[in-house]
Amino acid sequence: MKALKELSGVAAPLPMINVDTDMIIPKQYLKTIGRSGLGKGLFHSMRYNDDGSDNPSFVLNQEAYKNASILIAGDNFGCGSSREHAAWAIEDFGIRCVIAPSFSDIFYNNAFKNGMLLIRLPQEQIEDLTRQAEYGANAVFSVDLDSQTVTAPDGATHTFEIDDFRKHCLLNGLDEIALTLEKDSKISSFEKDKASAHSWLTPAA
Amino acid sequence: MQAKTLYDKIWDAHVVTTEPDGTCLIYIDRHLVHEVTSAQAFEGLRIGNRKVRRPELTLAVVDHNIPTSDRSGGINDPESKLQVDTLRDNTKEFGVEYYNEHDIRQGIVHIIGPEQGFTLPGTTVVCGDSHTATHGAFGALAHGIGTSEVEHVLASQTLLQNKSKNMLVKVNGKLGVGVTAKDLTLAVIAKTGTAGGTGHVIEYAGEAIRNLTMEGRMTLCNMAIEGGARAGLVAPDETTFEYLKGRPMAPKGKDWDEAVAYWKTLKSDKDAHFDAIIELDAAEIAPVVTWGTSPEDALAITEVVPAPEDFADEHKQAAAKRSLEYMGLQAGTPLSSIPIDRVFIGSCTNGRIEDLRAVARVVEGKTIAANINAMVVPGSGLVKKQAEDEGIADILKAAGFDWREPGCSMCLGMNPDRLEPGERCASTSNRNFEGRQGHGGRTHLMSPAMAAAAAITGHLTDVRELEATASGGTTT
Ligand code: SF4
């Protein structure tokens, strides 16, 4: 995965609760067998009119936010389907960090696997950050993973929590599969013990 | 020894290694694969020059993209066809068992796992699909994963996980007549909210849960994810064992006896600690329908469409306003007066034989309302065959239902089955998100019996009233 240490940029405010993955990337984009190019489908039904033109009232179509690298969203962001296409689409658009009061478990995992940083902050702080993000292109936020802080345009710093292992992988851009495969002997001995204790576990052919 | 929950027990039995911060490497016993979320994972294996570690623990099927009309002529949509062909080729290259669209065992991934006896109590089950929670009905720790994790499991048969918290949902008493597992699961979500289960694994317990059939328990656990939970669990019991016995991939002979002896130990200890407990009285649950675009927007059919001002929180108010606009509904309208255009019976929530029987019971000897298009999509080829053998298919066809081939179909409309903009559908699926069943389509979630009742009257209907009229005023 791509490493991420720090990031600064404009943050797009999307103060809606329960933004589901069907909204983030709808089904017509799920037929791909690749990972790239999904940014154009991001938030499809909110972002485009029925005739395919841009809906000017949607935040990512406004000049100030076209190059946003951070998204500030509402509670339960990324709920619904497990489609990793949602993370791929956000990342492909250029957003590497999403800040919200809470995320669905699966989306949270998927995003980190793609070198994105998701930050949970309490509701009042999110409301404050959303207000500041609404100032547009001049409101620059910075995020620092090492110190686990978000600095808002008004200079205030907000600290966030993250698991050490996840942080370590993202800071160093580690390939988790390679890391796991280094533990091959442990996996093999686990399998051996299981096979002798529970022979029924192997599916009947 | 410290008292443990069912979740604790299954978790502890699968930890391979633990990182200093508590992140664990968990062993995965069963991996289900479908065409939409696996291509990039197999591609990753190829790029990394890796193999599938235990192909015999992996089962693949096509379900999302395939047409539910006659398939003998192949798939017309070139992108769907490419995705299906890619799965076929990948499973062949990596030695994974695969049910193609002509195989009678083919069906929705969460229907065929249990049906084949691939899903077993006490196992860990994953799939690149959020409704993997379904398999928790067997007392398996089952959850959805993303494509990167699919690749991780294929390569290592393990997954990196942080342990979730324990939540207990206890449903006391008995469900009333006409009230089903679907009503129960929607009622739970209406109570907890769609984020209520976030970070938790839910164990469902209590008399009403014990009385559910395996089909009902699968419907219940299927929607645990809609309540935000990582997984849902029901402790295995005789109902579970009876369902599994003799299934093609279930243990046989001595293995079966050993397995059952072990499965009987799989229940929460009496003093086990739960981080959250929710109790419901089954008798208070009425048949439920959703009115909005989130599964938590569920109300008893006897209620009216709410107004945004009915919600305390300003974010909920904004969401309700948006939902009502999208759904084309006025606050104060009785739910039972809302006319519908389409009926969809199927999906991994309600595409099993018991669901089709419930529909047949309601519609037998009746015909669906004029101008309604009603489709039944069995969850698997075997469900379809059983329904045909039992005469259910004939009853449904005689009532005016369109009898289709198995798959996900209009649950999400990746295949040609979908709603047109503005069409309103009584649906037995699990998601009423904007555009889920087709761009601009309006979905009301409900049980199979309720969807059947709506098909007959042409509007959302309390199935208890329909049955009362049919039987001369008494319900049995
Ligand atoms: S039936 Fe619907 S919810 Fe179930 S796996 Fe298929 S698309 Fe997903």
Image (spheres, coloured by chain):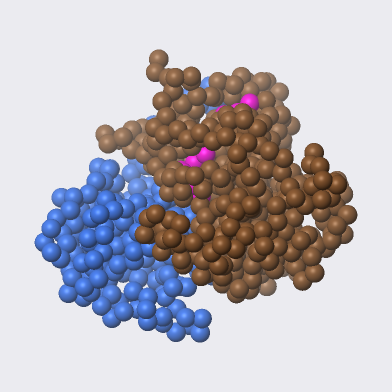
Chain colours: A blue, B brown
Q: Which quadrant: the C terminus of chain A?
A: top right
Q: Which quadrant: the N terminus of chain A?
A: bottom left
Q: Is residue A117 visible?
A: no
Question: Farthest residue in the left direction?
Answer: A155
From the top left corner, tell me how far across and down residue B199 is, in percent. Answer: 39, 42
Report which quarter residue A200 is drawn in. Answer: top right
Examine the structure image and report whether residue B474 is included in the region drawn in magenta. no
From the top left corner, tell me how far across and down residue B459 is, in percent. Answer: 70, 62
Count of numbered circles in the view: 0
Vertical order, B16 against B430 (above or below): above
Depth check, front residue: B185 or B297 = B297
Question: From the viewer's perspective, is B427 left or right of B474?
Answer: left
Report which quarter residue B368 is drawn in. Answer: bottom right
Residue range of the region highlighted in magenta in the rendering: B225-237
Residue at 41% x, 64% y is B318
Residue at 47% x, 81% y is A49
From the top left corner, tell me how far across and down residue A9 is, in percent. Answer: 21, 68
Vertical order, B365 against B165 (above or below): below
Q: Is residue B465 visible?
A: yes
Report which quarter residue B393 is drawn in. Answer: bottom right
Depth check, front residue: B36 or B436 = B436
From the top left corner, tell me how far across and down residue A133 is, in percent. Answer: 23, 68
Depth check, front residue: B238 or B281 = B281
Residue at 60% x, 54% y is B303
Residue at 52% x, 39% y is B232
Depth check, front residue: B301 or A9 = B301
